[in-house]
Amino acid sequence: MTDTTDQEKLQAARIETGRLLFAKECQFVAGAATLDMLPDLPLNEIAFAGRSNVGKSSLVNALTNRNTLARTSNTPGRTQQINFFELGGRLSLVDLPGHGYAKVSKDKIAAWTNLVNIYLQGRPKLRRVCLLIDSRHGLKDSDREVMTMLDKAAVNYQIVLTKIDKATKSDLNSVIEKTQKELTKRPAAHPGVFLTSSLKGIGIEELRAELAALEE
């Protein structure tokens, strides 16, 4: 048996740091349905974006070890405002309305899109956007529109594949390969993707570790 490498020790320490941070109390602090409702908060922010029903609320719940912190629903479009949560007085988690869902009024879609875009482009404390992609479907045009906007605004974002427990191995590998290829052309994207399943807990520790490093 070989000794644990320095890299493995470092990763273990990062995972423990992430576990400790996300074990802290996490509370809802504000909801913004209009621009004038956006709060001025002191903490660094991590936002969770993605198509409707991709699993944003489920991922926030899994990261924080809660079942009902962020509202979950099988009905796409239920998150109709930007929701802000405070994690242990050290980090803000932001759950955004889903994009790409057409079964609401065009006026409401336009209002959500404008609100989210202004938030994403104008928050000085926003450290990272986690852009969630359903691993069974891969990137869609609406995801690419968000990526292009983030690239132009120079806002760092990380692709997080969700529901990997529901994808076949071959389909998942194909989605990973295609996604990573697209990311090479995206200036604001972090290389590589996180693979997660909120239901099975896959990848949650690693994502916590990554996000905990953005606290300061």
Image (spheres, grey):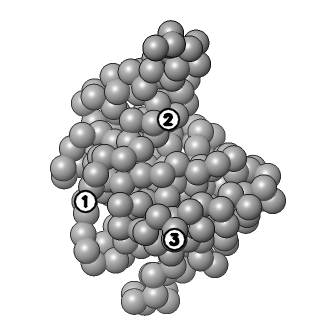
Residue sitting nearer the eye, 71 or 82: 71
Q: The residue tagged with tag 2: helix, strand or loop? A: helix
Q: The residue tagged with tag 1: helix, strand or loop? A: loop
Furthest toward the left, the residue is 67
Inspect the image, locate mark 1, and give the three-letter code of the amino acid beneath it.
Arg
Instruction: Give the side of residue 72 with respect to residue 172, left or right.
Output: left
Tag on residue 71? 1
Does residue 54 sit above or below 65 in this rendering? below
Query: Label 3 belongs to which residue?
Result: 171
Tag on residue 33? none
Query: Label 2 belongs to which residue?
Result: 211
Mark 3 vs mark 2: in front: 3
Inspect the image, locate mark 3, and give the three-letter code of the amino acid beneath it.
Asp
Mark 3 vs mark 1: in front: 3
Instruction: Give the side of residue 7 with respect to residue 184, left or right.
Output: left
Horizontal and vertical percent position of residue 214: 55, 30
What residue appears at the point 81 percent right and 59 percent down from the top-left corner? 185
Does residue 53 sit above or below 28 in this rendering? below
Residue sitting nearer the eye, 115 or 37: 115
Horizontal and vertical percent position of residue 78: 30, 72
Instruction: Give the side of residue 114 with respect to residue 150, left or right.
Output: left
What residue appears at the point 25 percent right and 63 percent down from the top-left corner? 72
Inspect the image, locate mark 2, and give the three-letter code of the amino acid beneath it.
Leu
Whether the residues at callouts 3 and 1 have beta carbons within 8 Å, the answer is no
CA gap, disc 3 to disc 1? 29 Å
Mark 1 vs mark 2: in front: 2
User: In this rendering, does residue 151 appear at all?
Assistant: no
Does residue 181 sit above or below 142 in this rendering? above
